[in-house]
Amino acid sequence: MELSPAASEKIASLLASNGLLSRDRLTKITTQCGTNKGKIVDELLKKNFTTEEDIAKVISRNFSIKQVTVNIDSIKPDIAKILPLEFIIKEKVIPYAIEAGGLKLLIADPSKLIHAAKIKSFTKKNVVFTVSTFSNIDELAANKMWEMAAKKTTTPQQVQKKPVQNFAKGTVNVVSMVDRIFQDSLKDGTSDIHLEIFKDNVCQVRFRNDGIMKIQEELSNMIASNYIAAVTRLKIMAGCDISEQRLPQDGAITVKDQSNNNIDVDVRFNTVPTKFGERICMRLLRSTNVIGLDKIGIPMSELNKFIKAIESPQGMVLVTGPTGSGKTTTLYAALAHLNEPEKNILTAEDPVEYTMEGIGQIQANEGIGLTFASILRAFLRQDPEVILVGEIRDKETVDIAIKAALTGHLLLSTLHTKDAVQTIIRLTNMGVPNFMIAGALNTVVAQRLARKICDNCKTEDTSVSKDQLKDIGFGLTEIETLKLSKGKGCDKCNGTGYKGRQGIYEILEVNSALAAAIIEGKRAPELLEIAKENGFKTMDQVARDHIKNGVITYEEFVRTISMQN
């Protein structure tokens, strides 16, 4: 049970004044908790200085409310739906009976007594509070009956589109609500959080998991009457100007992941003004996302090519793909591989997503003239072995990058192209002479991310026709023996049939044959054929291998490969 600092201090004081806790022990725990007063009661219980029964007893005595224990089986369905689901779950105020005296409510935290007037106004019934132990309250609040009762009275569409009833306005602790959004997202492995407001104060919270956005119905209802307060809280946490609501703002937040040993998680924050209010997008940047090269999903034969490229003393290595395809993960894995005291590694990023010890990381800021190009110029005077540029966006940046790659530096960067061969064409179109591309460009990695089939509920997929398989490049002989897989949906994958993501990579080495073709000005189809003759595997070939191996579905192939080519 989470308690506010005021409630925790109040309960501890009552225990002491009623002779249920010694003053020495109270002083000891209060000092130990320091400014975190909300933890006082929790620490008293952990050290067995008090019991939940004693706490319930002292609240009952001092607030003149009856102490009871309620069994979930005694609560009738019509009682379960008398208050909104989000209020019951969040506030831990449990309705359990209607008698002559009125609506009976169970609490463990005396600060919840302040809700009496609002509950009475909402239900049109007199309110009778009773008290129980934290364990009893937590057990009742966690029961699925509240969800089931809410579903019987509200359709999924209503949940998504109808704002929460006004009774809850001002009753939700905004600090706790925002923390709940973060903790739920961290527990689910979410990459991005979206808070959005539309016409008529319709609000929604969406999480992006494994690349797919999904509405969080309970959280959406929770923020509907508290949206502005939630936005304000987030802007304060991100160091943004709360008075400015007309312009986009960027910021950063650090939160504790309670599901993972309270490790720090950096959050990249952005707000943009819309017609109906500010819209928030937050990206969760877990330090655990910086993984080793052997963990990013490149097959070993191709991985050796990539390692050879990044261990070269000079040259340019480019990673390409659309937004959200995992380019940053690949580059940070490369940096982690290269990071050692003997190397001077410098990065220019916008923004710096992960802090890495031993590496000089610079945040670009075009507003003050600190562009990728200007940072690159400065880097060349810093005696680096390895340089990373977040993205090559313009001719000035690419010219300096090419120069760096040709003068004894390893240059890592990203480019937005649909495949590896098109990267060469893009560099040509940016005005780089062919001979310089051939001399500087070492390797190109093009990539996508596809959702993996959940291993826990994997089963055979017989729904895909032979014509569909033919359309994505399978040969007739392959099709006859091919067995496809899919996920049925289970608890581990939240019923989606997918769990985690698989990187799909094509790695293009610029060898002597390809370099000669680049100098000659060969077009993309010709470059592709030359690359294939030298063992190059395209992304669609790699993705088909993943289908054959039961890693991804036909649908994911279409979504991540076919639809983006």
Image (cartoon, grey):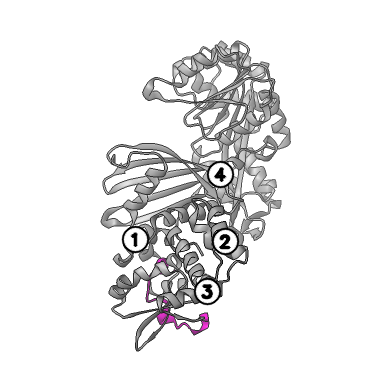
In the image, taking residue 381 as reference, residue 181 lies left or right, namely left
For mark 3, what is the residue?
Answer: 133
- Quadrant location of residue 98? bottom left
Cα distance in 3D space between marks 1 and 2: 54 Å
Element at label 1: helix
Instruction: Assess whether residue 160 is covered by the magenta stretch.
Output: no
Label 1: few (<14), some or many (≥20) within 10 Å? some
Compared to residue 352, the image places residue 275 above or below, namely below
User: Quick one: label 4 or label 3, which is nearer the N terminus?
Assistant: 3
Q: CA distance from mark 2 to mark 4?
A: 34 Å
> Could you give the CA–CA distance between mark 1 and mark 4, rounded to whole angstroms?
34 Å
Q: Report which residue position mark 1 lands on.
A: 161
- Amino acid type of the residue tagged 3 in the rendering: Thr
Q: Which residue is mark 2?
A: 24
Q: CA distance from mark 4 to mark 3?
A: 32 Å
Secondary element type, mark 4? strand
